[in-house]
Amino acid sequence: MQYGAATDGNPVVFIPSLINPPQVLDLSESRSMLRHMAAAGHAAYLVDWGAPSAQDAMLGLDGHIMERLLPMLAALPRPPILVGYCLGGTLALGAAAMQRFPAVATIAAPWRFDAFPAADLDLIANMWRGAKAMCERIGYVPMEVLQSGFWAMDPARTIAKYAAFADAAVGSDAEHAFLAVEDWANGGAPLSFAAGRDLFESLYADNASDAGRWRIGGRAVDIAALDCPTLSIVSTSDRIVPALAGPRLSEEHSLHLGHVGMVVGGRAREILWEPLSDWISDHGG
């Protein structure tokens, strides 16, 4: 999906997580990072990963980069600046390790998996242990499996958000925003089995990304060797991807917003969209 007309600068490709639909970056007319970027003069593109087919069961995270993402990026008129959100940021860094891009920014991207709370790592490991055989048999990881893990990380917050929704005025922007976020969060396509296995066993369990053991196209991913400007945006109040779990890049910007609130919340424009747009402009986008 493209937002904004072509410009003399580099296009900007926004890479969402594999786990949820890309619409979180274009949630509604008033809560859209992509539309803000287009209005600021950037030629912004949004990756849509689609849904895995039966033939994609063994398409791992490396395959999503080598067989899907890099060919898409090669079709653009000029090399793009990459902006990855959540697991999309992890994949953006993997892509940047394979070929050079003008600049790379990540938003709430997990990289240092050993920085997750031990209780969360245990929870995720137990969830995968119980679901793996079924997922391998059907060839994919259902959204219900993924959501159960996220909900269990912070059940009190899940209850609190529904309590806040009950207090929202009927027809208000807050009500519409809540419903849009819930539709997004619960409407994702499944992960291919191999991508789920890579995520839970190689990254979460083995910390392969930060330890230099994650390989794409036969090459180890070393983000310290990236020779382009890089920016890691993290949040000190992110419960899904703790700030300490973000990658160590040449620049870091710390927020105090939730994992989803940082991209769609009422303060997202001021705290994230505008500074990120300035950073993109400074680097040719």
Image (tube, rainbow, N blue to C red):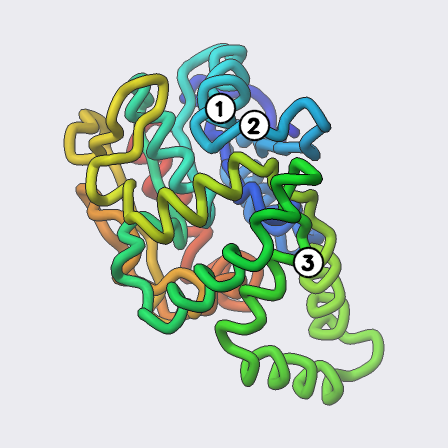
Label 3 neighbour load within 10 Å: few <14, some 14-19, many 20+: few
Q: Report, in whole angstroms, how far the alpha carbon at label 3 lies from the one at label 2.
A: 20 Å
According to the picture, the residue beneath numbered tag 2 turns out to be 58
Specify the label residue 63 is tagged with.
Answer: 1
In percent of the image, x 65 and y 45: which residue is there? 21
- In the rendered image, residue 210, in percent from the top left (x then y), is placed at 23, 44
Which of the two discs, 3 and 2, sits closer to the camera?
2
- In the rendered image, residue 31, in percent from the top left (x then y), is placed at 63, 56
User: Is 3 or 215 nearer to us in this picture?
Assistant: 215
Instruction: Look at the numbered disc 2 and give the secondary structure of its residue.
Output: loop
The reply, left or right, for residue 187 in relation to residue 13 is right
User: Is 22 or 141 nearer to us in this picture?
Assistant: 141
In percent of the image, x 40 and y 33: which residue is there? 92
Marks 1,2: beta carbons within 8 A: yes
- In the rendered image, residue 26, in percent from the top left (x then y), is placed at 64, 47
Instruction: Look at the numbered disc 3 and give the secondary structure of its residue.
Output: helix
Quadrant containing the C terminus in the rendered view: top left
Residue 61 seen by the camera: yes
According to the picture, the residue beneath numbered tag 3 turns out to be 144
In terms of sequence position, does the residue under pointer 1 or pointer 3 come before the other?
1
Label 2 neighbour load within 10 Å: few <14, some 14-19, many 20+: some
- In the rendered image, residue 115, in percent from the top left (x then y), is placed at 26, 61
Residue 22 seen by the camera: no
In percent of the image, x 37 and y 26: which residue is there? 95
Q: Vertically, is 178 above or below 193?
A: below
Q: Report, in whole angstroms, how far the alpha carbon at label 1 lies from the one at label 2.
A: 9 Å
Q: Amino acid at mark 3?
A: Glu
Q: Amino acid at mark 2?
A: Met
Q: Quadrant of residue 170?
A: bottom right
User: Is 197 or 16 nearer to us in this picture?
Assistant: 197
Which of the two discs, 1 and 2, sits closer to the camera?
2
Instruction: Look at the numbered disc 1 and give the secondary structure of its residue.
Output: helix
